Every structure is written in C-alpha cells, then in structure tokens.
C-alpha cells in the first residue's frame, strides 16, 4: 500500500501470522481475497507490497481490526525484546529502540528464539538448570530447554489464546447434549456413562484427601472431591470428555507446535483439554452474544452460564473468532505473595516473563477487600493506558486447619475498548487519571516510588548514608549502556 509519503507497505511476516491465526492456507486466503496464491506467497516473502484494497478486503472478509493487525503482536514482541535487552548483560550495546521494533515486526521467529534463549540463560545464571543437567547427566541441548510452563504460555500466546477446532467441537457437543447451564452436570455425567462407560462419583474429602479429581482407568470411574463446587464439577466432567473424545484434535494442535519434550507436551495437552472444558460450559456463540449484550458484566455472565468468576474472566480472553470477536482482554492471577500463576493476553498488555507485577496495580488490593470488585485506570511508562477490574476469588475450600486458598484475578483491556464495559459506565475515560505503574520493578524507571522492591536494572544504584528518600532505592537518571 502506498502511504502519504509514497512508501510501500511490506508486511510479509505479519500477513503470514494473520493467515496462520485464521487457520487458512495460502490458497484458501487467496480465494477469499480474490487474488492468486502466488501473489499471497510473494506478499508473505516481502517481495510484493500489500495494497490498501487487499487490506480492506482482508478486514471485511475476516472481520479483522486493522489497528490490531498493525500493533498487537509487534507490541508484545517488542516488550519481550525490550525486557531482554535491558539486562546488564547488554549494557555495553547501544541498541536503539527502533531496531528492536524492526526486529519484532520483521522477524517474530527470531524474537521468540531470543526469548527462549534468554529464559534458559536466566535459569542457568541462577544455577538451577546447569546443576540439574549435570546431576542428571543430560546432553548439552537439554540444559537450555526453556521452562515448560513458559513454553506452553508462549504457544498459547502464539495462537492468541484461540483454538477454532476445539471451539467447533465444543459447540457440536453442546448442541448434542441440548442441556441448559443448570442441567449440564447431569448431561455430562450421562454422556460419560453412556458413551464411555465412565461412572461419575462425588467422594468425601477423607477419601480423596489432597486430590480434587482422579480418573480410575481400571474401574472406569471419575472421582471428584466433595470440596469442588458446582461449576468446578461440571468443568471436570467436560475436561474428561475432552480427553476422551477430542484427543486426536488436541494431539493435532500439539503436533503443530513442532518438537516438544515430554513435559511441555503433556502440559500443553492438559491446557488444551481445559480450554475445551471451558468452551463446553460457555459455548462460543451464545457466550459472545451474552457478553456483548450484558456489556461484559462478569457476575451476570457467571450466573447465566453457571460458572465461576475466574472461569468467566479466562473465557473472555479467548473471544477471537473471525466475524465474532470480543474485547481483547488480558488476565492475571496472583496470590497474596505476588506470585503469578496465570496470565493470558489477547491484546497488547506487556506481561513480564522474568518477574512479578507492579504493587501499585490494585489487583493486589483485593485481598484487603475480598467482597468488592475494584476498577482502575492504569498507565505504563510509555503512556499506554488500560482499564482493569480485579476481584479476589476462593478456590475449593480446604479442610480445617489447612489455609483457605485465595487468589486475585485481574482482567483488563486497552482504554479504547473500555467504553464497552459496564464497569466503565459514567466514567470520562479520556480525562480519567491513570495510576502510573510499571511492568515490574526491575524494568520500571519511575522515580520516587514508595513501593519499589528493587532498583531498575537499566540504571546505576546510588547509595548515600546521609539521605533517606521516599523510595528505598535511588538511582542515576542516565541509562546504562
């Protein structure tokens, strides 16, 4: 496409990612756009520019937001690169930000590889990966295998947390069951019993002990602890059906990821089975329609679909179907010590892969107000603003005297989408003051923050025994190179 300055738009890698996210071949997308497959091939190899007509046709045919196409993945990749190259390891390299943006846009595969390499490096630097490898006498390649949890998170992000094959399978099954939300547990139990000869049993806690769900393969019994609430019970039955009936589909998705070690492969399969279970409880089309009509009222959605607050929030991050997209949400789950146990983003929020979150984000305050939903406008150092809601949730109760597990769920979106949310009603989003936060302390360069836990790794720490500042750490204004 020729811009006002006369420059042509070459977006080959970006175009290819869009096609792959839509699950289309070059021939299929060429048919949809009314051009030849060979021309698509040239576009993806950056040998032909993309015209305005093709972009508009792409957006209209597949219900894509061109603003998201231009920034979503690149912003995420740029945030990852910026975090990596802020490490003191690279302080002698004067690397302009624009070069990082160029790399994120043109070479996303390289960005992903650098992220994995840096993750392995940080593990080795702590002594964990190398020591484990030496004790187990593993080969050199195994020493640098990325953390399996991060590996699976990367795969989820690469698919924008949307798997059309599982969505379709879940909708087909739900149509077969023809059951309301209140009847779903009974319908799923009947499905397991009649089609797979699996009997569902709710078991007392003294039998299950620390286990909430267990499939007894020999006796063909699915055992669920009495501690699991109603929505959790339906979810566990749906997960078991997913493993029994969608195993081939799940394996096909896993195989698309390329070579995986046993641990990330198993974790990916479990994650996809969980995705299918959520899609059974909240089928895409009715859930998307309800979310839009209710202005994303999480509590009402939970009531309508007989689901939990966290289940609904998680499901909202998956609404990426062409022609029926929802608000691109991000989600975070933390415990009261600040440990991040879940994060998903269908938008551009720059989650840190190598640290915690900012304590000024009120997701942490929900532990002090367990019965309230908190909302907040937050602003990152680069000026990007987001709207978020947060609430504390309780997991399956634990028998006395074990501590009751509690987590905080944060759900948010870019400020430009916030007007669609019931929680922003009556707010002047343009004038609302945003709470300044950082990605995390090690990357945030905001000065005089009373909540700072460590100095930024991009600045030199200043120590002065004669002065005590608001922040526990003082640092130079000049960025280290």
Image (cartoon, rainbow, N blue to C red):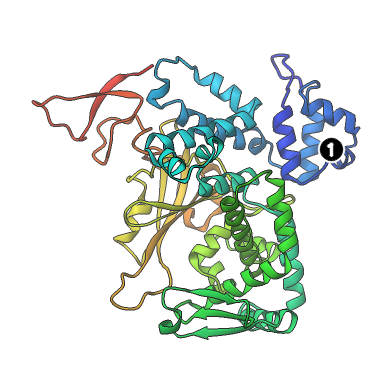
Q: Is residue 325 visible?
A: yes
Can you say whether 436 is above or below 297 in the image? Answer: above
Residue 212, percent from left and from top: 48, 74
Q: Residues within 10 Å of mark 1 (few under 14, many from 20)?
A: some
Q: Out of 139 and 44, give the one closest to the viewer.
A: 139
User: On the image, numbered disc 1 is attached to which residue?
Assistant: 26
Which residue corresponds to the image point at 59% horizontal and 28% vertical from the top-left?
Answer: 104
Residue 370, percent from left and from top: 34, 65
Image-quadrant location for residue 154: top right
Left or right: residue 420 versus residue 444 is right
The N terminus lies in quadrant: top right
Residue 293, percent from left and from top: 62, 62
Image-quadrant location for residue 223: bottom right
Residue 462, percent from left and from top: 21, 23
Which residue corresponds to the image point at 69% horizontal and 54% vertical from the top-left?
Answer: 163
Can you say whether 161 is above or below 35 in the image? Answer: below
Q: Out of 304 and 408, give the one closest to the viewer.
A: 408
- The furthest residue to the left: 466
Q: Circle 1 — which element?
A: helix
């Amino acid at each position: 496409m020729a811009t006002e300055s006369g420059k042509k738009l070459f977006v080959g890698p970006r175009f290819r990612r869009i096609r792959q996210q839509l699950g289309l071949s070059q021939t299929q997308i060429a048919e949809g756009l009314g051009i030849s497959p060979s021309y698509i091939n040239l576009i993806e190899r950056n040998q032909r520019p993309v015209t305005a007509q093709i972009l508009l046709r792409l957006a209209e045919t597949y219900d894509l937001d061109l603003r998201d196409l231009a920034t979503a993945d690149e912003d995420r990749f740029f945030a990852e690169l910026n975090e990596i190259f802020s490490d003191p390891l690279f302080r002698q390299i004067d690397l302009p930000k624009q070069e990082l943006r160029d790399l994120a846009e043109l070479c996303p595969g390289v960005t992903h590889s650098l992220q994995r390499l840096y993750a392995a490096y940080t593990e080795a630097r702590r002594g964990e990966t190398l020591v484990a490898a030496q004790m187990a006498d593993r080969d050199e390649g195994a020493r640098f295998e990325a953390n399996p949890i991060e590996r699976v998170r990367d795969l989820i992000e690469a698919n924008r947390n949307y798997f059309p094959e599982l969505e379709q399978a879940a909708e087909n099954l739900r149509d077969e069951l023809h059951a309301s939300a209140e009847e779903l547990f009974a319908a799923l139990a009947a499905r397991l019993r009649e089609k797979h000869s699996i009997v569902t049993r709710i078991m007392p806690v003294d039998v299950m002990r620390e286990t909430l769900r267990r499939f007894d393969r020999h006796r063909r019994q699915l055992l669920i602890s009495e501690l699991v609430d109603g929505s959790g019970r339906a979810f566990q039955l749906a997960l078991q059906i997913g493993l029994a009936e969608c195993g081939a589909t799940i394996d096909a998705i896993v195989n698309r990821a390329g070579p995986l070690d046993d641990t990330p492969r198993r974790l990916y399969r479990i994650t996809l089975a969980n995705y299918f279970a959520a899609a059974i409880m909240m089928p895409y089309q009715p859930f998307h329609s309800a979310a839009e009509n209710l202005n994303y009222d999480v509590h009402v959605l939970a009531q309508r679909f007989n689901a939990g607050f966290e289940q609904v929030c998680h499901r909202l991050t998956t609404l990426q179907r062409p022609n029926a997209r929802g608000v691109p949400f991000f989600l975070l789950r933390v415990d009261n010590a600040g440990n991040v146990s879940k994060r998903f983003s269908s938008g551009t929020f720059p989650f840190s892969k190598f640290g915690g979150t900012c304590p000024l984000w009120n997701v942490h305050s929900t532990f002090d107000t367990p019965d309230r939903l908190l909302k907040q406008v937050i602003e990152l150092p680069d000026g990007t603003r987001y709207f978020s809601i947060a609430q504390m949730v309780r997991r399956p109760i634990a028998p006395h005297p074990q501590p009751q597990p509690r987590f905080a769920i944060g759900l948010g979106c870019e400020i430009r989408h916030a007007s669609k949310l019931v929680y922003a009603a009556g707010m002047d989003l343009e004038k609302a003051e945003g709470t300044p936060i950082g990605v995390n302390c090690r990357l945030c360069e905001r000065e005089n923050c009373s909540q700072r836990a460590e100095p930024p790794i991009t600045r030199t720490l200043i120590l002065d025994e004669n002065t005590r500042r608001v922040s526990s750490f003082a640092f130079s204004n000049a960025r280290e190179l």
